[in-house]
Image: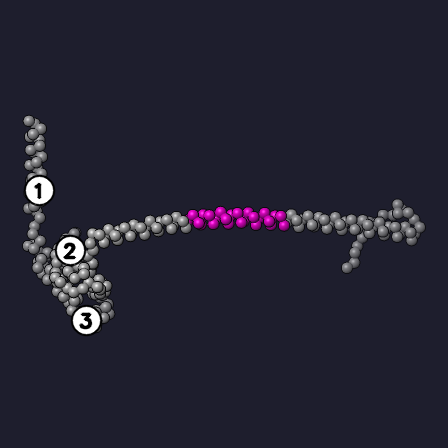
Amino acid sequence: MIMKKKIWLIICMCLCLIGLTACEKADPTTVDYNGYTYDQLQTACQNTVQQLEQMSAEQAEQYLKSGDDITVGMVSSWQEARTDLGAFESFGDFTITKAGKTLTAAQTVNYKERSLILTYVFNYNTMEVDGVTVDLVYTTGEKMQKAGMNTLIGIVTVFCVLILISLIIYAFRIIYVLERRHTHEKNREEAKARVVEQIVEREEQQDDLELVAVIAAAIAAATGTSTDDFVVRSIKRRR
């Protein structure tokens, strides 16, 4: 019995919350948007679309040269999005969304090939236009395809970076091996040079001893003495 009462209490609370939510959700067409009505904002968006549709090439060029960031951005976005949409068919849904100090009014425009959405962004406190955007409407399949392509590009980019890092690490290993080989060859060349110098020094010493013996024998023969009676201290070569 107690369990049934708890269940009924929970159900009643849920019904009350649903009722309060339904009451709080007012009809957007009757809401006052800081001095502007739903119909006024909708008319502003639709008039903008009609003006852009009737805009000539000369007028578009003047708008792009105006220097006003909002106008330049709106016209350039419109020209880019309007390509290959086909003929104008009708106006679609119009929605108003308020988030904090920002109010957005979005008008869907239906064309033969694809729809687009023109969105006004207002500062709610002053109702000044902060920006105007033009976005194409994509189907769920196109969105999934685009998301898949973005995911694939991200995966390929990650693998490319990993391969590049691996190549850099491998290059460092090659550089280390080459440096060791260069150092080893340099040490071998230095050792070979030292050996050659030692051989040359030994040959010079051996040549000096032979020269000393020849000179001593010549002096002994000239003086009629023995080579044991004198000692050759040094030899100076004249160059």
The residue that appears at 82% across and 50% down in the rendered structure is 210
The residue that mark 2 highlights is 103
Point out the tag, 3 or 2, that comes first from the N-terminus.
Answer: 3
- The region drawn magenta spans 165-189
Q: Residues within 10 Å of mark 3 (few under 14, many from 20)?
A: few
Cα–Cα gap, marks 3 and 1: 52 Å
Name above or below for residue 9 compared with residue 184. Answer: above
Q: Is residue 150 left or right of residue 35?
A: right
> Which is closer to the viewer, label 2 or label 1?
1
The disc placed on residue 18 is 1
Point out the tag, 2 or 1, that comes first from the N-terminus.
Answer: 1
Determine which quarter of the picture holds residue 7: top left
> Which is closer to the viewer, label 3 or label 1?
3
Q: Amino acid at mark 3?
A: Ser
Q: Amino acid at mark 1?
A: Ile
Q: Nearer the viewer, residue 98 or 75?
A: 75
The residue that mark 3 highlights is 56
Instruction: Based on the picture, tell me whether residue 188 belongs to the magenta stretch.
Output: yes
The residue that appears at 16% across and 69% down in the rendered structure is 54
Determine which quarter of the picture holds residue 88: bottom left
Q: Amino acid at mark 2?
A: Leu
| Residue 144 coordinates in the image, percent (x, y) | 24, 51
Name above or below for residue 117 compared with residue 3. Answer: below
Point out the tag, 3 or 1, that comes first from the N-terminus.
Answer: 1
The residue that appears at 44% across and 49% down in the rendered structure is 167
Cα–Cα gap, marks 2 and 1: 26 Å
Determine which quarter of the picture holds residue 127: bottom left
The residue that appears at 14% across and 53% down in the rendered structure is 97
Helix, strand, or loop for circle 3?
loop
